[in-house]
Amino acid sequence: MTASVPPRAQPEAVCPACGSMVRQGALFCPVCGAPAGHTGGHGPSGRTPAGRTGGYEGNTGTMVNLELVNASTGKRAGAKLIDLGLAWILQLLPYLLALASLSTLSGSAYPTSSDEQALLAAAVWWVTGTVLGIALWIFCWAWEARTGKTPGQAMLGLRTSGPEGLAPGWGAVFVRNFVFGLICLIPVAGVVLALISNMFDPNSKRQGWHDKAARTFVFDVRAGRDPLTTGGINGPASFAPRADLPSVQEVASPMASPAAKPQVPARPATAPAAPPAGAVPPAAAPAPAGAVPAPAPAPHAADPDADLGATRFAPSRQTGAPAAGGAPSASDVVLTFNDGRRIALRGPVLIGRNPAGYDDETVQEFLAVDDPGKSVSKTHLAVWSDPSGVWVQDRKSTNGTRVVRADGATAEAPAGQPVLVDAGDVVRFGDCFFSIGRGHA
C-alpha cells in the first residue's frame, strides 16, 4: 500500500437557515442549530421530511435536536458579576489595609520611624493585592481555556465553548475577556452593555459581542447537555449511521467470471509395501569426490517486523479468519475522517500534517491531513490494531489527542502512551477527528 495523498481542501458549506459557515461533516450549524446542508459523509440527507415545508421547523437557536441550551442573559450577567466580585474582594481587602496604613502618617515634614513603618506596610499590602489579582486572573484564564469554567459559571452551571463545542482555548478566552474589557470602557453604560450584549444577537440571543469576536458560545449545562464532555456540539451522534440509507444488496457483476479449471481427482493414498523380513534397506549412494553439499534453505524470519535499519512499509496482510480469541482482523477496522475519507486499518498508520516515522519503525501508511490552521502536528498520532483491539498513541503533539467514547465520556490520551479504543469512539486531534468503525472502506 502506498502513502495516502491528501485530497484537495473542500470549502465550508453555508447554513441554509442563518447563512453561517458550517464545517464539512457537521450535522448541524454551530450558530443556529439548523440541519447543515451537506449531502456527503455522515451528514443528514437533504430530503425534507413529510409534514415540513423545509428549514428547521421553528426551533432555530434552541438547538433542541442537540439537547443544547443557550445560557440566558440573567445567568450570563450573574456569572460575570460573581467573577468580578471575587476579584474585587480578593484585591479590596489588601488595598484597604494599605490605605489604613497610610492614614497613620504623622504628616510632618520630617518622617518619623513610625511613618517609615506605615509606608512599608502600605507598600506590602498594595503589592499583595496586585499579586493576588494577577494570580486570580491567570487561574481563571487557564481554567476557562481548558474546561470552559470560571468560578461564576461553575456555580451557575454555565460553560464556555469554542466553535466546535470543545474547550475554547487560551487565545479565544483572551480575546473574549479583552473585548469585554473594551466594552466596559464605554462611559456610563459600558458595563451594562457588556453584560447584556447577547440580547442584541438575532440568533436567539446566543452570542454577546465578545463571544462573536472570539467565536465562543455559552451553554447552560444544567438545562441541557454539556458539549465539552459529550463530544462537542454535534456529539458522538455525528458518527451514527444514517437511518435513511438503503440496505446493501448484492448486484450481479457485468464482468464475466473466469472459467473454472477442471479439478483433477486426487489419487488415493496407498501405504507402501512392507519390506520382507530380514531385508536391509539400501544405503544412500556416496557423494562423488569433490562435491559440495547444497546449502540448507534459509529459515524464515521469526519476526516479520524485525528492525531493518530504516522506516519501511509493511506488506499488506491477507484478509482471513479472525485472530484467536474472537478479535476482529485488522481489515475489519475502518477510520472515518471528518473530510469524508474512509481508511481500512491494515497495519500501523501515522497521522499528521506531514507524518514521518522513527528509525527502525514499521509503518503501513502515512496519512496526511489538510489543516490550514496548523492545529495538527506534523506527526500527531499513531493508530494500529492487534488481537486485543485498536490502539491510539499521541506522538507528543502540540495540541494533544482526545478520545470521545461512544457514551460521550471524554479522556485525554497521554503523550507516548497507547490508549485502547473501540467501535463508536471518536478520536479528536487538533481541529480534525475520525471515528472508529467496523466494516470495509
Image: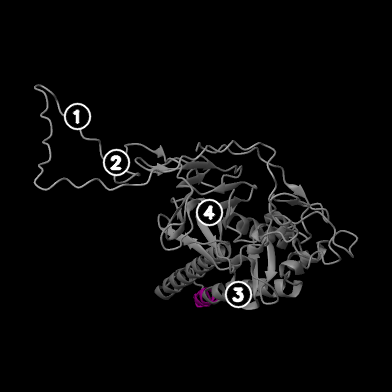
Q: CA distance from mark 1 to mark 2?
A: 18 Å
How many neighbours does mark 1 have within 10 angstroms: few (below 14), some (14-19), or many (20 or more)?
A: few
- Report the predominant secondary structure element of the magenta stretch: helix
Residue 300 bears which disc, if any?
Answer: 2
Residue with the mark numbered 4: 332
- State the SS at label 3: helix
- State the SS at label 4: helix
- The residue type indicated by label 2 comes to His
The answer to whether marks 1 and 2 mark residues whose Cβ atoms lie closer than 8 Å is no
Q: Which residues are magenta?
A: 96-106
Q: Quadrant of residue 291?
A: top left
Residue with the mark numbered 3: 154
Front position among marks 1 and 2 = 1
Residue positioned 42% across, 76% down in the render: 114
Instruction: Indicate the position of residue 3 as horizontal and vertical percent values.
Output: 51, 37
Task: Tell me, yes or no, if residue 431 can be seen here.
Answer: no
If you read the primary sequence from the N terminus, does the residue marked by circle 3 or circle 1 appear first?
A: 3
Q: CA distance from mark 1 to mark 4?
A: 44 Å
If you read the primary sequence from the N terminus, does the residue marked by circle 3 or circle 2 appear first?
A: 3
- The residue type indicated by label 1 comes to Ala
If you read the primary sequence from the N terminus, does the residue marked by circle 4 or circle 3 appear first?
A: 3
Residue positioned 88% across, 59% down in the render: 54
Viewer-closest of 401 and 280:
280
Viewer-closest of 213 and 345:
345
Instruction: Indicate the position of residue 134 as horizontal and vertical percent values.
Output: 52, 64
Front position among marks 3 and 1 = 1
If you read the primary sequence from the N terminus, does the residue marked by circle 4 or circle 2 appear first?
A: 2
Q: Is residue 95 left or right of residue 250?
A: left
How many neighbours does mark 3 have within 10 angstroms: few (below 14), some (14-19), or many (20 or more)?
A: few
Outermost residue, front side: 276
